[in-house]
Image (cartoon, rainbow, N blue to C red):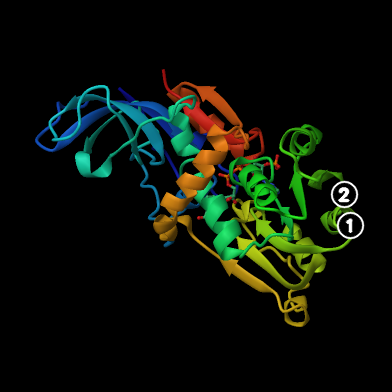
Amino acid sequence: TREIHLASRPTGWPGPENFRLVETTLEDPADGQVLVRTLVMSVDPYMRGRMNDVKSYVPPFQVDKPLEGGAVGEVVASAADGFAPGDLVLHNYGWREHVLADAKALRKVETPAGLNPSVFLGALGGVGLTAYVGLFDIAAFKEGDTVFVSGAAGAVGSLVGQFAKLRGAKRVIGSAGSAEKVAYLTDELGFDAAFNYRDGDVREQLKAAAPEGIDVYFDNVGGDHLEAAIASLNLYGRIAVCGAISQYNSTEPTPAPRNLALVIGKRLTIRGFIVSDHGDRMKPMLAEVGGWLTEGKIRFNETTVHGLENAPQAFLDMMRGANTGKMLVELS
Ligand code: NDP
């Protein structure tokens, strides 16, 4: 079987040289273990942080060891109660074609009718929970709010905009990095307005898209997007700080937001969060978002790359915006 190891730690932007495809063999499952074949795995922005040797909310990847990440697989052989060949399981041992895992590290899942197993890596998984918790709990969204979300054509962002519309937002605005993504937001996802942040000043473009200001900013990007949101936020506005992808490959501290003092007069709330702290919200998220999905009220796009050998490039391409919706790697 094959797996992807961390070959070296990147400085600044990672490249293919930081990854290595390794052939290995696995034993038969010992007592309590299960052999799983990966069907589909996730590549996510937070993995960039794990490539650095720094203390964070998740431990760093180890050089010359396989990378980790969300994946859905099929049980091939089992020496554990409750798991049988053919069972579908969700686990955190992505980046490898097979894994020999402790049954405790696996969660059995059943794909809802009409959906693919990859849904557990997207709308009905951590991605859906991130959008749900960030918008409804952290940003305390309420009906009638005007919402701005950056990274809006990505996995989390595309859900945030649609959730806000379904719960009665007055206006939803998104930013993304290409004309095609902007058209996707307004024509297919029902955003009221969208702009390409590469077309010009983010602050000016946001002002034009939200002439009456915004009440909530869901931040996936940081930097000039955060500064623009602070400028456009109304009194008592709220910011959920979910990510800062514009800074993940920076080698120098970044200056924006330069207008942070506006937080005082506008009485703004800026709150960061980590989705794994909010497992208790999974059940209500699955009920509400699962309903929207099966009723066809939300769209969740996937950009799928095939073959483990292409997983590093899929990750690198996602970091540069090649994905619309969730970036996934299917292993055949
Ligand atoms: P996405 O599907 O949104 O993929 C990343 C996207 O980021 C790219 O498609 C690209 O789109 C955009 N991007 C890259 N560089 C820049 C830049 N310099 N400026 C603006 N946009 C950029 O990923 P996810 O939905 O998985 O994650 C979105 C954010 O949420 C990330 O910041 C991630 O770290 C964060 N996150 C946080 C969690 C938490 O617990 N706090 C949990 C999960 C995710 P484009 O073409 O538009 O540039």
| Callout 1 touching callout 2 (CB < 8 Å) | yes
Q: What x and y, as percent, mark residue 99?
A: 28, 31
Q: Amino acid at mark 1?
A: Glu
Q: Position of residue 30 (x, y in %)?
A: 11, 33
Tag 2: residue type? Answer: Gly
| Foreground of the two, 155 or 320 | 155
* Label 2 environment density (alpha carbons within 10 Å; few <14, some 14–19, many ≥20): few
Measured along the vertical axis of the image, is residue 207 above or below residue 63?
A: below
**Which image quarter is the C terminus in?**
top left
Residue 35 occupies which quadrant of the picture?
top left
* Quarter of the view holding residue 191: top right
Residue 148's image quarter?
bottom right
Residue located beneath label 2 in the image? 200
Q: Is residue 226 visible?
A: yes
Q: CA distance from mark 1 to mark 2?
A: 8 Å
Q: Residues within 10 Å of mark 1 (few under 14, many from 20)?
A: few
Q: Residue furthest left?
A: 31
- Disc 2 CB within 8 Å of nearest ligand 1 atom: no
Q: Is residue 124 above or below residue 269?
A: above
Report the residue marked by disc 1: 204
